[in-house]
Image: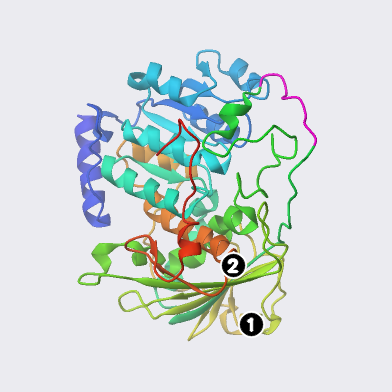
């Protein structure tokens, strides 16, 4: 009876939210679980960032059935902490041997292997929680979103601030017109990265690390502590730089409040063959191995239904004019939405402690539209509940995919001259062959999506 009631509640929530039924490719469906059911979860990349989410899933009473990390020494304590979970170094072997025992998968590897691991899981009908940024390339983000939709699995990108109550209230207030029509935004980041130089000296591969598996689809190169275990983010081959890494946090309010995901949805653009986003970057330098020391990127974003076109400027290390904050102190990080009735500013990329400007006008403001977004216990809890058929996730790949595409477009624009025109419906760059060639990169033999 409880399963039937959960199914009815989920169908009701799905119809109001406009989401489809979660029919999986295998015989299991989201309706197979009731509130007390345990999911069988596998973790890929458990020696670093994945630890906290794995602990959260386990505290909720779920089973950790398989743990995979290319570095057995770094992940050794996790293996010991969960002795009932079968250890692996290669997620492909894990899926071959454990497919029928796994319901859902955590992916917390370096950026360059997110897509190959998550897509493999989704093709097997497994729900996926993937750390941010969703992928390393624009094309990979698109494939992640399309694969999730095709296999109807529950997904969540790990930008945990999305579960913050303040963020959801900020989004609701913008949706409700509190600051009016937004035609201008500014997003700035704590700093840039700078050029990187490949090491010329060789170093022994640490005990327990399978370097070939760590490289995954990336081009082959000798091991160096300059890359791993935790120094890969500033390298173009493996990480996404400051913009790619943190836009999923810092631009989060803006992306959601302005409903920018609609630019990627054919259903929201009926009768339209192309939706063009124009992007241009001014980097301090262009480096074949790393990311700029500083940069400025301007997005020209078209209208979404009744919502007006928007100019969004992103800054790495640089800052917008302090005058835009109307006397409020400018933080190291920032997400500023400028509306016709006021502005909304958040200086924290991980949660949404925000102010509305000018402060004097809004100092006693407690109003706005009624709450329309659910409030949840945590980002991880929301995904687990959605896997069981209770509600939906707020940072699914329908959102995380386009947000990641936008972040990686900002990176891509810094590597070519002049503006690029990106068609969000087809995933193609229309005006630049050099830029078009950077949408994805060739994988090493043995790796594919």
Disc on res. 349:
none
Q: Which residue is mark 1?
A: 324
Of marks 2 and 1, the one in the foreground: 1
Q: On the rendered structure, is 117 left or right of 29? A: right
Q: Position of residue 280 (x, y in %)?
A: 54, 73
Residue 264, quarter of the rendered image: bottom left
Write the start and end of the magenta stretch as one range. 201-208
Residue 59 part of the magenta-drawn span: no
Q: Nearer the viewer, residue 29 or 147?
A: 147
Mark 1 surroundings: few (<14), some (14-19) or many (≥20) residues within 10 A: some
Split into 4 quadrants, where in the image is the C terminus? top left
Relative to 102, is 333 above or below? below
Q: Position of residue 67 (x, y in %)?
A: 52, 22
- In what element is the residue under mark 1? helix
Q: On the rendered structure, is 356 left or right of 181? A: right
Mark 2 → mark 1, Cα distance in angstroms: 15 Å
Q: Nearer the viewer, residue 118 or 66?
A: 118
Q: Which mark sits nearer the N-terminus, 2 or 1?
A: 1
Q: On the rendered structure, is 376 left or right of 271? A: right
Q: Nearer the viewer, residue 243 or 212?
A: 212
Q: Which residue is mark 2?
A: 354
Give the residue drawn at x 54%, y 53%: 161
Give the residue drawn at x 76%, y 25%: 204
Q: On the rendered structure, is 333 left or right of 148? A: right
Q: How is the image coloured?
A: rainbow
Q: Position of residue 17 (x, y in %)?
A: 27, 55
Callouts 2 and 1 close, C-beta under 8 Å: no
Give the residue drawn at x 80%, y 35%: 201
Mark 2 surroundings: few (<14), some (14-19) or many (≥20) residues within 10 A: some
- In what element is the residue under mark 2? strand
């Amino acid at each position: 009876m409880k399963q039937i009631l959960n199914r009815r509640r989920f169908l009701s929530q799905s119809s109001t939210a406009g989401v489809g039924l979660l029919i999986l490719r295998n015989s299991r469906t989201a309706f197979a679980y009731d509130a007390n059911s345990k999911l069988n979860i596998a973790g890929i990349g458990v020696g670093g960032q994945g630890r906290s989410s794995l602990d959260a899933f386990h505290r909720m009473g779920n089973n950790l059935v398989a743990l995979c990390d290319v570095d057995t020494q770094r992940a050794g304590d996790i293996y010991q902490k969960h002795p009932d979970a079968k250890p692996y170094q290669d997620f492909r072997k894990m899926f071959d041997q454990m497919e029928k025992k796994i319901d859902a998968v955590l992916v917390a590897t370096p950026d360059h292997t997110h897509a190959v691991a998550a897509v493999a899981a989704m093709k097997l009908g497994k729900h996926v929680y993937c750390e941010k940024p969703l992928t390393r390339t624009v094309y990979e983000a698109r494939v992640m979103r399309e694969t999730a939709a095709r296999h109807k699995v529950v997904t969540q990108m790990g930008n945990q601030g999305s579960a913050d109550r303040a963020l959801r209230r900020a989004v609701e207030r913008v949706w409700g017109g509190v600051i009016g029509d937004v035609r201008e935004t500014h997003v700035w980041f704590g700093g840039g990265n700078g050029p990187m130089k490949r090491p010329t000296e060789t170093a022994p591969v640490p005990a327990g690390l399978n370097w070939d598996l760590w490289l995954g689809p990336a081009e082959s190169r000798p091991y160096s502590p300059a890359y791993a275990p935790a120094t890969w983010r500033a390298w173009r081959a493996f990480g996404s730089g400051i913009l790619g890494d943190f836009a999923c946090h810092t631009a989060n309010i803006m992306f959601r409040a302005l409903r920018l995901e609609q630019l990627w949805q054919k259903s929201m653009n009926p009768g339209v063959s192309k939706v063009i986003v124009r992007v241009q970057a001014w980097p301090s330098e262009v480096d074949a191995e790393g990311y700029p020391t500083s940069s400025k990127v301007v997005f020209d974003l078209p209208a979404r239904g009744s919502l007006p076109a928007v100019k969004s400027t992103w800054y790495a290390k640089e800052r917008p004019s302090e005058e835009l904050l109307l006397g409020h102190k400018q933080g190291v990080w920032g997400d500023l939405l400028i509306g016709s009735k006021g502005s909304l500013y958040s200086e924290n990329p991980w949660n949404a402690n925000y102010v509305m400007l000018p402060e004097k006008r809004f100092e006693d403001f407690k109003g706005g539209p009624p709450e329309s977004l659910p409030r949840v216990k945590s980002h991880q809890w929301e995904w687990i509940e959605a896997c069981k058929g209770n509600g939906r996730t707020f940072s699914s790949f329908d959102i995380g995919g386009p947000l990641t595409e936008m972040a990686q477009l900002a990176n891509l624009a810094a590597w070519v001259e002049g503006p690029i025109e990106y068609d969000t419906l087809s995933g193609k760059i229309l005006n630049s062959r050099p830029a078009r060639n950077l949408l994805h990169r060739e994988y090493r033999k043995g790796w594919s999506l």
